Amino acid sequence: MKLHPINIITALSLLAFSGFTLAQTSNSSTEKGKQAYVKNGCWQCHGFVGQGGIAGAKLAPDTKPIEYFQAFVRHTNGPMPPYTEKILSNQDLIDIHAYLKSIPKGPDYKTLPLLN
Amino acid sequence: MTEPKQQGHSPESRSTDVPLARRGFLGGVLASGAAVASAAASLATSSAHAAEPAKPSALPPSAKGAQAETGIPPDLGHGQGMPGSDFMVDVIKSLDIKYLPSNCASSFRALHESLIDYGGNTKPEFLTCMHEESAVAMGHGYFKASGKPLLTLCHGTVGLQHASMAIYNAWCDRVPVIVVGGNDLDAAYRPPGVPTFHAAQDINAMVRDYTKWDDTPVSLQHFSQSFVRAYKIAMTPPYGPVAISLDAALQMAPLHLHEGKMPYIPKYIPTSPPQGDSGAVKEAAKMLVQANNPVIVVDRAARTPEGVGLLVQLAELLQAKVIDQGSRMNFPKTHYLSAPATAIANADVIIGLELSDFWATVNAYTDNNSNDGHGTNASRINPQTKLISINSVDLLTKSNYQDFQRFQVVDVQMAADAQTTLPSLIEAVRSAMPADKKDLIAKRGELQRKAYEEDKVRNRTAAALGWNESPISTARLVMETFAAVKNEDWALVASEGNVSNWPTRLWPMEKHHHWLGRSGGYGVGYGAPASIGAALANRDLGRFSVSIQSDGDLMYAPGVLWTAAKHKIPLLSVMHNNRGYHQEVMHVQRLANFRNRKVNLDGDMGPVGTSIENPDIQYHELAKSMGWWAKGPIKDPAQLASALKEAVAVVKSGHPALLNVWTQPR
């Protein structure tokens, strides 16, 4: 997922100004996050396990921090359309992030005979 | 192609060796028949005059006029000499066209009968198709595998309307396809009702914007000239489809003398492709050797295997990176100078060879709803970067359809065939190469070797993500398929849908036939028929054909599966079944977000109107019903290898096989 540095700063500032706290992930649900990930179309470009592809960046493993994630999803101006709170609630976003973080790291390509 | 023998005709005709002895005999019969008919008409006229008083104010009608007004139109197909359609078969045979995929229709019934009975149904062999779009797309795929064009016959109007999307794909992909449309021109004689609904003044009008040339011959001599001319035009780079409207009466009419002689068949002599201007070639060479970071971008540069070799020569001479955009297999993926599209960023000179879109090569468009919904444009290169283009399509720009893409200013632009120009460009680069640059150029190559290895690691790391997931990742699908075919002389004949370009990123494509490229015009419905057309060519060449087949593409005209089974065309079709029109899934989602609305799924996974689920299509059952070996749905990646092994064995036994695999979206 790529975001211009200026856009990141702007987005994070906006979030700080709104007083919205995003780092509270203690009440997140990976199962609900998985459902929200599918229901809100994230799978369309990023694949069902966030593996990415030609249409969207890799989201998992090594998922970006929630602050970056939130800023990007709400304010991106790139090929991915932004998701407002009306379309995707803050709780859904937190859950999606939790789901992505829960996706285990897959095999190293060096261990896969078909990729060597 | 077998060179036809020269006949003793004038230099203008230069006919091929046609069975003139038989024609001469039949021509004599025909002349006698005409005399009898004329005498009968005269008698009829005489009788009419005897029964009625003379009317001095009007001249009596001619024998031909009287026959036309009072007589029953003769059935020209019976016993009046050699049918015109037999002569047409001789013309077609002179061009060594091997197959004729077609959907039968009354407007070319005479030619159809001549092809299978007079012509013995060989060269061309009639292949029964269930849709004209499939027939044309089969010719499209066949050409890319064999370098030889096919002929297809279409019903006038409705058949050509069905064929038109596939003709447009061939046009955009610069592929020659010869399309003959049956049409009954004579409104006074043609049967009423359906045949008249299916007739038009000018059927070619509907495809004129995306064919190189078309004609409506009005005599058999005219037909032979037009057909050979059409073949010649189609086969001169830039290649492209051609259309001939074939009058039903002309097919039925017996052979007539032309200027006192039997009609001749012109000899086909290929036209030399256009080569770049020598001054422009020298200027381009000078720019390339002086560049610090030249990049070669290719799309349809290698028309033949020789083109691949020439590109390797040019790249190695300059130690320049090559970005292969993949409309053909232009440059070996195993070569260290092969580079991803991002390699363009630091170029100071870019040479584009047969690019379908130079603007999009050096610019980026983002569909982000900015600029009143138009999206944003940004350059991907430095402002000082010099651009060179060699493109034969510059010689063939029409107005209506926008396949010429957005306008890009280019510093040196040659309207010429790239492959034909490459030998002189290579020579010019050699001559212009300053001795003091050689070390710098060698160093450039070393850096690229390192970048190439890094890129390989990046691709493999990305491919491993989601490797064991269900639905099956597109990378796993593609690499399991490769493992199953790698010991064959394989050809990836199509990869429709979008599997994140894994084949071109991961398969060791080296030979020209390893990859045939895409549809050209992105008209969905190309994959299945073009794969089968290419597999037909590969069957004769002893190659193993494999296709990555998307679900949406297959459902446009699945009847082509039956054609493959009927004519025993071996093809391994591995489905990328993501259960949706995935490009559109994302478009509708994007628009909903832009408008701040939650998209309506109505129980499906994608927005309403974009999913192909509930019910799920059992593609393997569909294929089985049409004579294919098939298996599915395969959702577990661990089951894929064994299914592929079985399918490969079926294909090697000469039959088509399909695996319905549920995959990740892309």
Image (cartoon, rainbow, N blue to C red):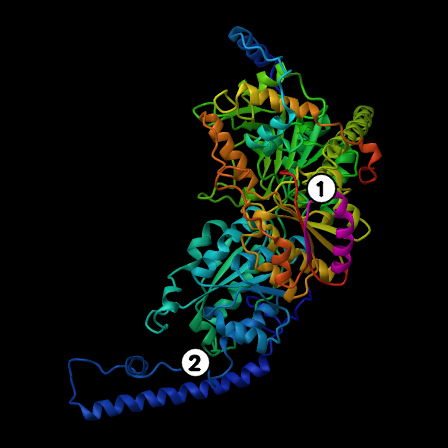
Residue B158 in the image, given as x and y percentages of width and height: 44, 60
Q: Amino acid at mark 1?
A: Pro
From the top left corner, tell me how far across and down residue B318 is, in percent.
76, 31
Separation of residues labelled 1 and 2 (CA atoms): 56 Å
The nearer-to-camera label among 1 and 2 is: 1
In the image, residue B226 sits, relative to residue A62, either above or below, namely below
Give the crowd class for mark 2: few <14, some 14-19, many >=20 residues within 10 Å. Answer: some
Whether residue B658 is visible: no
Q: Mark 1: few, some, or many residues within 10 Å (few <14, many ≥20)?
A: many
**Numbered disc 1: secondary structure:** helix
Residue B643 covered by magenta stretch: yes
Residue B245 versus residue B638 in the image, above or below: below
Main SS, magenta residues: helix
| Residue A40 seen | yes
Specify the amino acid type for callout 2.
Answer: Leu
Chain identifier of the residue bearing label 1 in the image: B
> Which numbered disc covers residue B92?
none
Q: Which residue is mark 1?
A: B503
Which of the two discs, 1 and 2, labels the residue nearer the N terminus?
2
**Residues in magenta, as a range:** B630-651
Q: Secondary structure at mark 2?
A: loop
Q: Mark 2 highlights which residue?
A: B76
Work out which quarter of the rendered image holds the C terminus of chain B and state it.
top right
Across and down, in percent, residue B125 comes to 62, 69
Q: Is residue B636 above or below residue B139?
A: above
Which chain does tag 2 point to?
A: B
Q: Position of residue A97 (x, y in %)?
A: 63, 22
- Occupied quadrant, residue B275: top right
* For residue B609, side relative to residue B447 (left or right): left
